[in-house]
Structures are given as C-alpha cells and as structure tokens.
Image (tube, rainbow, N blue to C red):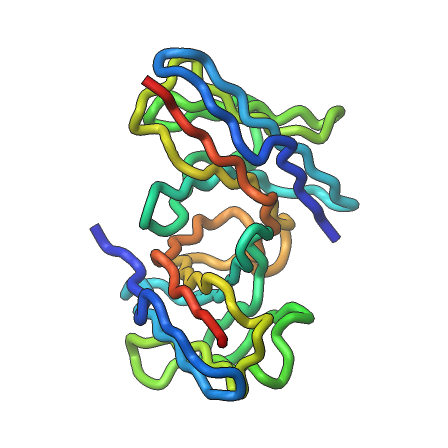
Amino acid sequence: AQSVTQLDSQVPVFEEAPVELRCNYSSSVSVYLFWYVQYPNQGLQLLLKYLSGSTLVESINGFEAEFNKSQTSFHLRKPSVHISDTAEYFCAVSELQGAQKLVFGQGTRLTINP
Amino acid sequence: EPEVTQTPSHQVTQMGQEVILRCVPISNHLYFYWYRQILGQKVEFLVSFYNNEISEKSEIFDDQFSVERPDGSNFTLKIRSTKLEDSAMYFCASSEVRGGSGELFFGEGSRLTVL
C-alpha cells in the first residue's frame, strides 16, 4: 500500500516570492508521482508527473518538481509565484502496474498575497 | 477542450434516501473513476470501471454504493441509503489509457450533504 504526506496544509506567500510545497510518500513498490492542482470552483487538473527518466519535471506554468528516491520526496517548487497560482495542490502516487488508482496527500492550500 | 462534467454540483438529502450522482466522461475515454473527499480529509479512491464492469474498488465502496454506465455517455454513482458520513465532495474522473502512467481528467465535483 502507498501513502502520501503533504507536510503543510497551508502556505501563504507574497507575490513574486519563491515557494516550495513538500510531498513525501511511502510505498513498497515503484510508483509514478503526480501533482494535481485545484483552482477555486474547478476540478483537479494534472500539473506535472514523474514517470521515469530525468528526476526533474516541469509544468508549462513554471512549476517544477524533483523526484528524490532516497528521500522518497517529490517537492513542488516555483521560483516566483503569481496571484493566479492561488489554489490547492495535491501530491499523488500510483502503482506502475494495475489500474490508475491515485493515492493522494491531504493537499496544500497555496495563498498568494499581493 | 474536452472536459468531464458532473451533475448536480450540490445535493442536499435526508439520511436514508437514495442519491444518484451523474458524470459525463470525455467521449473517447475508456476508464472511469469515482473519488471522494470528506471535508478536511484526503481525496480517496472509491472505484474504477472499465468495459462495463468494476475493475477495482476500495473498502469504502461497500454494498450501499453502485456504479453504472447506463448509456454511451453517462457514468453514475448511486448511494442506496445515505448516511451522515457520506457527506463529501464526489469527483468523477476518466482516462484514455489504463495503468498508472495515464492522466486522469477530473470533473468539478458534486457536493453531497446528508442531513
């Protein structure tokens, strides 16, 4: 079985400041790793994912996440946030085999202050 | 852009009543899912569905729950006799491919409040 821990339930930052949202996971098997984002009044959207290869993955809107196998982490970072990044961010894992069953963390609410 | 749509966005019901939550997945997707999020808790997997049958379900998905694809477009979650603890946001999702690497596309959710 897998589990995902997002260490911060809320992260307030000022606009243009850097941010890191932390995610740690545990699993007895290899997993894929995902970050999903939920903007206000919308569904969950895939932000980025790690399947294999380079441990650093990037999204189209400037976020990046680095898979660290030894620390079982997949922290999400952005060097300079914008008001429009205000959302809830969910880290998730799924097994390599079998159905696409995501195991989510509890979410981190990112609030950007002007 | 294709999207997953869910209805109703919010439903209030009395304990013991039956509820049906509806979803229209993306048209060329073959795999369908229901997740739920109780307020303040994690998003949890309920069930996955492929080829007109359940492919996997969690221990949450007991006999009170059922899923159906009654026609070529809708995917429904039925809760036969709702309990207070069924109050949650229910998310429908669909994917084009099976397996852990595929992207799930989620709907905006249906908020169920059981009184």
Q: Is residue A101 above or below residue A20?
A: below
Quadrant position of residue B32: bottom left
Residue in the image at 29% along x and 63% along y = B5
Kindly give the residue lying farthest to the right in the view shown. A28
Side (left or right) of B92 relative to A106: left
Kindly give the residue lying farthest to the front in the view shown. B115
Quadrant position of residue A21: top right
Q: Is residue B115 above or below residue A53?
A: below
Q: Is residue A84 above or below residue B29?
A: above
Q: Percent position (x, y) of residue B61?
A: 61, 74
Residue in the image at 50% along x and 72% along y = B49
Side (left or right) of A50 relative to A85: right
Quadrant position of residue B74: bottom left
Q: Percent position (x, y) of residue A96?
A: 63, 48
Q: Percent position (x, y) of residue A69?
A: 71, 28
Q: How many dots with numbers?
A: 0
- Nearer to us in this view, B56 or B8: B8
Q: Percent position (x, y) of residue B10?
A: 35, 67
- Nearer to us in this view, B62 or A15: A15
Kindly give the residue lying farthest to the left in the view shown. B1
Residue in the image at 45% along x and 13% along y = A18
Q: Is residue B28 above or below residue A104?
A: below
- Nearer to us in this view, B12 or A64: B12
Side (left or right) of B88 relative to A2: left
Residue in the image at 31% along x and 71% along y = B8
